Amino acid sequence: MNVNEPSFRDSVDMMFDRAVAVMDLSPGLKQKIKVCNSTYTVRFGVRLRGAIHTFTGYRSVHSEHMEPVKGGIRYAINVNQDEVEALAALMTYKCALVETPFGGSKGGLCIDPRQYEEHELEQITRRFAYELIKRDLINPAQNVPAPDMGTGEREMAWIVDQYARMNTTDINARACVTGKPLNSGGIHGRVEATGRGVQYALREFFRHPEDVAAARLTGSLAGKRAIVQGLGNVGSHAARFLSAEDGVTVTGIIERDGGLWSEAGLNIPDVLDWMKAHGGVQGFPGATYVPDGASLLEAECDILIPAAMEGVINLTNADRIRAPLIIEAANGPVTAGADAILRKKGVVIIPDMYANAGGVTVSYFEWVKNLSHIRFGRMQRRAEEARHRLLVEELETLSADQGLGWTLNADFKDRYLRGSDELELVRSGLDDTMRIAYQSMREVWHGRNDVDDLRMAAYIVAIGRVAASYRAKGL
Ligand code: NAD
């Protein structure tokens, strides 16, 4: 990375500063919103393989204008305070933008999870969770983590169990963390949620021809060519849904060990199976292997989807990026310096704060489910079916009585009669959230002549809401 590149947190702060420069906020309130309220650093030892190993973890709380605060826990070897604070700040703005009633937080553990056996990871996770729980840095009412890079349902299940063991009378214990497996209080659709949100964000973008034209594109999402970096939780779902359901051709994939290229399009489930069996993309048949995977970020395509990690589009490669539209599925993939270069080139960027908000949105639904102690749709599903059946039967009787000869298509009947289950309700809530949040950004984007990009619009909407919250508290 270029030495002139600001750190991740400086990048987030610079983007914040750009937005507040055109907002009518007092300097004191601007500063209050910008700063990270607290960061707790923990160092703890775990006895593994006959020796004590010391681990360093963080939990950072950016803003408590709403509680609980929310944000994932990341397992990666390069986790540091600066990164965790940047991610916590992004969570504050993200939650405000998509109207989930949370403040922003983030956590991280410096660890390469691939170096440990499952039972070792469990020991480490439980110990990390213990340290956070005893300080209320994991708590259903105060601070609710979720998965992020390097963590998933398995780690969340260990965390909720650890919390329940330490808080045996807390009836809301399951709401202490989201992204859990279904049998530990999770919700249908959480694993796919962030990738699904990326798909819904792109669908919404392509509903607005004016916005599509701003990216020098035409037409609909169908037929567009995309490059995806990172086929993990977020990237794999986004790539799979976009190619299977929206007619997007994924021509390029970038992973840790290199990239794959196919003009005809890559079959995502096949690539995922290959990665599972071989630990990387190298050797995948039917595609060209590119050893310097990151070079594919610069290849020609309609939509670039960085879904791996931060800082991958930076001062060293920004001017060679050829995609006219970038959707930031990862957090912070474009540095502040690169952002300025890309804006000048006329590239439209759908910002992380919005693009990957599907995860926290469905986490919100999971938290509500845990607090209400009932699965979504449990009360309504059959009632909905009964009402629909009433209508269908009445139509069929009318048709028979009047000799009209109407017949309802069997597939339509089947789909119309079915009541909504939890997964359908979650997807519907997510779709609605992504549409409304996009519209709030585009109103600012097109409605103000001092705003010419979606990121600045997103910050303005989010900061405005956080400011209103602080004002309502009398600050
Ligand atoms: P993950 O660990 O499941 O997947 C990351 C993927 O990127 C892996 O397949 C990994 O091999 C690949 N990768 C890592 N380094 C790479 C590199 N240098 N080049 C190419 N590929 C590389 O993580 P995830 O949960 O999918 O998160 C990815 C990004 O999305 C992160 O920025 C995270 O903060 C963000 N995010 C995740 C969620 C969520 O719900 N999981 C929600 C919002 C945002």
Image (cartoon, grey):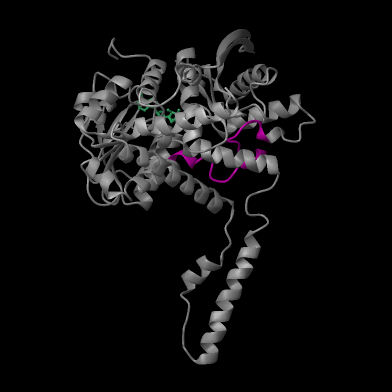
Is residue 100 left or right of 159 when viewed as pictured? left
The quarter of the image that holds ligand 1 is: top left
Q: Quadrant of residue 311?
A: top left
Percent x, y of residue 66: 59, 29
Percent x, y of residue 458: 40, 33
Which residue is depicted at the point 59% across and 22% down?
121
Percent x, y of residue 300: 20, 36
Quadrant location of the C terminus in the rendered image: top right
Quadrant location of the N terminus in the rendered image: top left
Question: Is residue 74 found inside the magenta-colored segment of the image?
Answer: no
Query: Magenta: predominant secondary structure element?
Result: loop
Return the residue nearer the eye: 248 or 353. Answer: 353
Which residue is depicted at the point 41% across and 46% down?
200
Which residue is depicted at the point 49% across and 18% down?
85
Return the residue nearer the eye: 393 or 77. Answer: 393
Looking at the image, is 127 positioned above or below residue 93?
Answer: above
Q: Which residues are magenta?
A: 175-195
Is residue 101 left or right of 230 when viewed as pictured? right
Specify whether residue 40 is in view.
yes
Is residue 392 left or right of 380 when viewed as pictured? left
Return the residue nearer the eye: 165 or 302. Answer: 302
Return the residue nearer the eye: 225 or 12. Answer: 12
Question: Is residue 186 found inside the magenta-colored segment of the image?
Answer: yes
Specify whether residue 279 is in view.
no
Q: Quadrant of residue 442?
A: top left
Which residue is depicted at the point 34% across and 14% down?
6
Percent x, y of residue 84: 49, 18
Looking at the image, is 62 positioned above or below residue 416?
Answer: above
